[in-house]
Amino acid sequence: MSRPEFKQIIRLASEYRTVLTPTAVVLEPIDPSQCKMDEQKSYFTPEAWAVVEKRLAKPLFPNAAEIMRNCREFIHQAWQAGCILTTGTDQVGFTLLPGYSIWREMEIFYE
């Protein structure tokens, strides 16, 4: 993201008032404490919850920490450049219920 081409793209996105929707939450490894998984548990059957726990134990991406650093840096640079940033629709996945994912997305923006 330090390359001149990236800086130019961000500048143009700001200039043309392009709306950027990074949907960073889909890339983040799910941390049960951050995503309020204890609250979500009541919406699952015991069998479904067992599957969720199994999925939470294995990261989706082996380099997830680096991916999230880059994602946060992208959001920060776009914000600094004056781009319009928005959260998209909720992540629809088996491990993070709609509603919870949009809140986590907003937290990532804040971070």
Image: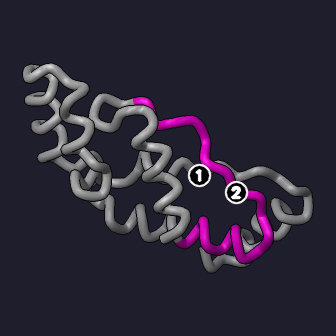
Q: Is residue 98 magenta?
A: no
Residue 43 lies, with reference to residue 24, above or below; the image says above
Residue highlighted by disc 1: 22
Residue highlighted by disc 2: 85
Q: Give residue 8's position: percent from left, percent from top.
A: 80, 71
Q: Give residue 105's position: percent from left, percent from top.
A: 49, 52
Density class for disc 1 (Cα within 10 Å; few <14, some 14-19, many ≥20) is some
Tell me the element at label 1.
Answer: loop
Q: Which residues are magenta?
A: 73-92
Residue shown at the point (43%, 30%) measured from the top left: 92
Residue shown at the point (69%, 68%) measured from the top left: 78
Answer yes or no: do the residues labelled 2 and 1 have beta carbons within 8 Å? yes
89 displayed left or right of 25: right
Residue 92 lies, with reference to residue 79, above or below; the image says above
53 displayed left or right of 19: left
Q: Give residue 53's position: percent from left, percent from top.
A: 12, 38
